[in-house]
Amino acid sequence: MTEDREYREAQRRVHALRGLYVHAIVYVLVNLLLVGINLLTPGRLWFYWPLLGWGIGLLAHFVAVKGGGILGPEWEERKIRALLDKQR
């Protein structure tokens, strides 16, 4: 891997991490607001539904950025090399 490519890959990862951190902060702030609104108004409790639904989305974002494992960058690199080798 060339230095330029390594730099671009690191830059992409940092951008993805920043997006994950922003997503997590917004999740916490908005859901705190929703919990507050729900607890201050009479009626049924509903705040857990957006908390759960958005939490699933945040978890998916986390796995996409940090999960790596099964379908991470290493897997992509292996697949690219395998396909290129197959074409030759």
Image (cartoon, rainbow, N blue to C red):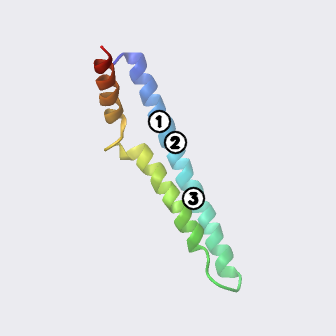
Residue 27 has which mark? 3
The amino acid type found where label 1 is placed reads Val
Mark 3 surroundings: few (<14), some (14-19) or many (≥20) residues within 10 A: some
C-alpha span from label 1 to label 2: 6 Å
Label number found at residue 57: none
**Tag 2: residue type?**
Arg
Q: Residue at x 28, y 19 (%)?
A: 85
Marks 1/3: CA–CA distance: 20 Å
Q: Nearer the viewer, residue 86 or 49?
A: 86
Mark 3 → mark 2, Cα distance in angstroms: 14 Å
Q: Which mark is residue 18?
A: 2
Name which residue lies at 32% across and 30% down.
Answer: 79
At numbered mark 1, what does the secondary structure look like: helix, strand or loop? helix
- Picture quadrant of residue 65: top left
| Above or below: residue 85 compared with residue 26 | above
Q: In the rendering, at what x and y percent does residue 73 appear?
A: 36, 34
* Tag 3 secondary structure: helix
Does the CB distance between marks 3 and 2 fall below 8 Å?
no
User: Does the CB distance between marks 1 and 2 fall below 8 Å?
Assistant: yes
What residue does disc 1 label? 14
Residue 57: x percent and y percent? 52, 56
Quadrant placement of the N terminus: top left
